[in-house]
Amino acid sequence: MAYYSLVASLPHLKIGDEPPFSTEEYIKKCGQWITEREVRILEHILRNEHTEQACPICKKWFNLETQLRNAIARHRGQKLGVDFKEYIQPHDGFSGQVEQYVTDAFTRNDPIELEEELDRARWQMAEEMIGQDSFGFMKVVAYGIQLSIVERWNNMDVHTGKEKLEAVITANTEKEETADSE
């Protein structure tokens, strides 16, 4: 089914911009246009709720995302000299393009650039799921995924990030001090 009015009403998205609305608001907005079944699919994907009875669209996205995360775990494990095998999750199918996205991202030295490149990969994976039907339900799903990426980057705060980093460093330092005193 085509959703010309819905898709045409969606504002342009770009990583780093202010999101036009939240992911939850997007789901509600779409609920006026799409079927109840499609709303549930959209909710599962955008809330990252993976279920065994997932629909084919959900399975496709979760398999791509799992492959991406597995590739990230392999790269980080190899870089740090850590056994990454315990972090690898099963998934169906294989995309050489997903592997290439991650390999390209790990050429970045700056952690922020690396994360942004990984989200650009997710953005592109969502875009590729649309196929030829630019006004179909897959466009609605892809836009939601892209909106969640924009929302994620908009919610990043340097001050909050520094506080979290300091808390991790403090916790690790305290663990080392405790281990040294024993």
Image (spheres, rainbow, N blue to C red):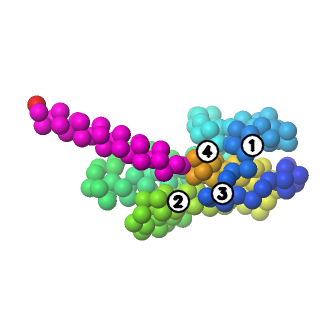
Q: Which residue is mark 2?
A: 116
Marks 4 and 3 in Cβ contact (< 8 Å): no
Say which label, 2 or 4, has the lower sequence index.
Answer: 4
Q: Position of residue 86 (x, y in %)?
A: 35, 43
Amino acid type, label 1: Tyr
First of labels 4, 3 by sequence position: 3
Task: Categorize mark 1 by other alpha carbons within 10 Å: few (<14), some (14-19), many (20+).
Answer: some
Indicate which disc, 2 or 1, sits on the residue closer to the N terminus.
Answer: 1
Q: Check disc 3 and give the amino acid type.
A: Asp
Tag on residue 26?
A: 1
Look at the image and tell me in which quarter the C terminus lies: top left
Foreground residue among 69 and 152: 152
Q: Which mark is residue 17?
A: 3
Relative to residue 147, is residue 30 depicted above or below?
Answer: above
Q: Which residues are magenta?
A: 156-181
Q: CA distance from mark 2 to mark 1?
A: 23 Å
Q: Residue sitting at 87 percent across and 54 percent down?
A: 4
Residue underneath mark 4: 59
At label 2, the amino acid type is: Glu
User: What whole-number distance in Å separates the C-alpha atoms at marks 2 and 4?
Assistant: 24 Å
